[in-house]
Amino acid sequence: MTTHTTGTREEWLAARLALLDAEKELTRRSDELARRRQELPWVRIDKNYTFASDEGNVSLADLFGGRSQLLVYHFMFGPDYSAGCPSCSSIADGFNGVAVHLANHDVALVAVSRAPIAKLQAYKQRMGWSFPWASSVDRDFNFDFNVSLTEQQQRDGVEYNYRREASWTLRGIGDSLTKDGEGPVAELAATTGTDVATYTRERPGMSAFVLEDGVIYHTYSTYSRGVDGLWGMYQWLDRAPKGRNEQGIWWRRHDEYDTAQSNCCAATA
């Protein structure tokens, strides 16, 4: 028998209406935050960023694809990775369907990683993705937008998510890494064929840019839990009866799940 609170339909409806008030307030607050993002001052980009892409070497302006707005997802796939980060991969699973709608609303969506373009193309084919993905290998873009760091920066500590972060030997992404280098971050690192140090030299995030009168401006960036809203599965889980209900790293790349287990796990949990 369930240990969760139960009640009549009338009791549920009363509680649901109270929750609805809180949800509406959150929606209004979210709308306000969106307006404040749009009110941020724009910073002119004068550096000549280039990338390797399916079309060869391209500029940052080329990534706009004829649109006036560009959203870049900083996908964790470093030069030494054998596969993309499974968390970023889960987020990117939603890009194919979204990108076509954004493209028809004057917004380009592009992923950028530091792995060589051949690695990105092979992984993209494996995952069945079609969204644009460019490589910034041996270039400054990822470092300038605080999603990649050198080994020296890693030893000294680095600025990430708008605060100074301690050396990776003490902390990894967020607070998930234990001092002996084990824990959830180490689990994720292993799935990319790397160790914790190599894995955490790449960080997740997204950045926004606008192109006006031939000039590119940086308008917004967010990191860490700031990309949580882009992670589609969590928006569904937050509305599921048991919520996120997590105990460690449970997600996989979408081609790594045991299909039989996926189909039966709800019945046996």
Image (tube, rainbow, N blue to C red):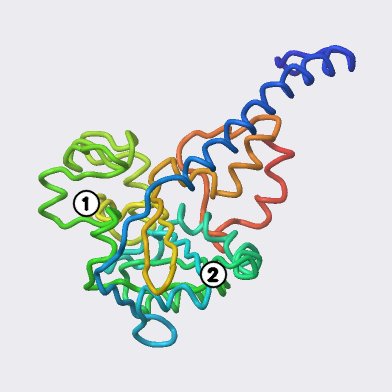
Residue drawn at x 62%, y 29% is 26
Q: In this view, does 150 lie above or below 99?
A: above
Q: Quadrant of residue 55?
A: bottom left
Question: Which of marks 1 and 2 precedes in the sequence?
Answer: 2
Q: Which residue is outermost to the front?
A: 213
**Marking on residue 128:** none
Relative horizontal placement of residue 100, taking residue 76 as reference (left or right): right
Q: What residue type is labelled 1?
A: Ala
Query: SS of the residue at dot 1?
Result: helix
Q: Which residue is outermost to the bottom?
A: 56
**Marking on residue 197:** 1
Q: Residues within 10 Å of mark 1 (few under 14, many from 20)?
A: some
Q: Where is residue 95 in the image (x, y as percent from the top left)?
A: 57, 63
Q: Position of residue 75 (x, y in %)?
A: 40, 60
Q: Is residue 176 above or below residue 101?
A: above
**Quadrant holding the C terminus:** top right
Residue drawn at x 34%, y 44% is 185
On the image, numbered disc 2 is attached to which residue? 127
* Nearest the eye: 40 or 168: 40
